[in-house]
Amino acid sequence: MKTFFLFFLLLFLPFAAPALTLKDKLLGAKEGDFIVTEQNKIYSLLIVREVLPSFIELEEISVPESHINLKETSWSSWLAQGSPGHSSWMLYQIDFVEEKLQESYSFSQKQWLYVDDSDYLFAKLLTLSLTAVSDKEKRRIGPPPQDVEPDRRAIWDPPLTREGKKMKKPHYDVYRGQWPKDQSQLSACTILFYFDQERPSFPFPYWLELSNGYISLKLRTIDSGSGLHTPLAHTAPPPPFHFTGASQPIKEGLRLSLFTLPPAHNFQLFARNLTDPNSPPCAVEFQVKSAKQTGTVYLDIAKKDLTARLMSGHQYVWVLRSKSRPQQVIESPFSFHWKP
């Protein structure tokens, strides 16, 4: 009897669901997962390009409603045709470690762009603590009953479309987040996320609703799916950094000038020996110093480190590699003769 009573009590206790973050959901994403949202008559196709424990890459392609007929073509067919009529084609990299938007590249304009991390909603929502909304709290259909009457109204669920097919009677896990009062656009906003209950591993919400009494925003998903890849899925953008001048001697050692969009501490610096081509490149430590010009930084290398690593009288070139994108490697267009 005691066991049954304990079971009965536990069954009705209001357990607090563990907190969730959007970062947790994105870490479980798979390459090719996608959603399509619609706002102001613009479709935005968001595709997971690559996901690793340290970062996620997303491609976002926007197209006006008037430039695509979804009754006659699928998103995969449209992509295979080169996405005709698209207005923008972006690549974003979100850093899970630093929890911010790290890089932004426009395939349309063929250039890296400065993007204010505070303006990229997804990056700002990464670490917002989300708590589950109980059925009792969920939005319902129709007017509320009188105070003495039980609420028998059906729970409202937004429509769910998967691979172009509208799902019957979808159900959602709803989570609520509360943005703190600050100077941002989301100040004091209550944010609701609707995730597909049938596919808990799917990373994107199907409905996003923000409100703080002054602003109200609803973002709806019109399609979703998996296994979608763009023709540019394996096209690496050019490195977003380059050397801007030859090595300059300074009191402490040598200084390199670099133009870069990602933070300079995300690089590895090597010296490649031209005099002895068979010797492996030497990793070289550096300190980052700010410059007055936007996007320009200095890499200062201590003389003692150069003396310890380089061979006197040998000719070298600098090699710079991105930590987050190891395939992005550049060599300095100049060489230098090392002599302590």
Image (spheres, rainbow, N blue to C red):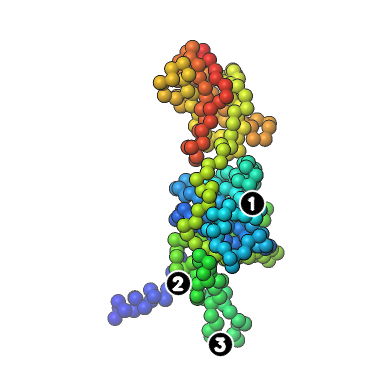
Above or below residue 172? Residue 286 is above
Residue 174: x and y in percent read 52, 68
- Give how far apart the Cα atoms at labels 3 and 1 are: 52 Å
Residue 336 can be seen in this image: yes
Above or below residue 102? Residue 223 is below
Residues at marks 3 and 1 touching, judged by CB atoms closer than 8 Å: no
Task: Please give the residue where the numbered disc 1 appears in the rendered image.
Answer: 88
Above or below residue 232? Residue 28 is below
Quarter-wise, where is residue 157 in the image?
bottom right
Near-viewer residue (333 or 2): 333
Mark 2 against mark 3, which lies toward the viewer? Answer: 3
Q: Residue at x 39, y 75 (%)?
A: 11
Q: Residue at x 55, y 71 (%)?
A: 159
Label 2 element class:
loop
Residue 149 is labelled as 3
Residue 211: x and y in percent read 64, 65
Residue 171: x and y in percent read 49, 72
Residues at marks 1 and 2 touching, judged by CB atoms closer than 8 Å: no
Residue type indicated by callout 2: Pro
Residue type indicated by callout 3: Glu
Residue type indicated by callout 1: Ser
**Residue 281 in the figure: left or right of residue 90:** left
* Mark 1 neighbour class, 10 Å CA radius: few under 14, some 14 to 19, many 20 or more: some
Quarter-wise, where is residue 83 in the image?
bottom right
**Of the residues under marks 3 and 1, which one precedes in the sequence?**
1
Near-viewer residue (192 or 238): 238
Q: Residue at x 48, y 37 (%)?
A: 327
Task: Please give the residue where the numbered disc 2 appears in the rendered image.
Answer: 14
Label 1 element class:
strand
Mark 1 against mark 2, which lies toward the viewer? Answer: 1
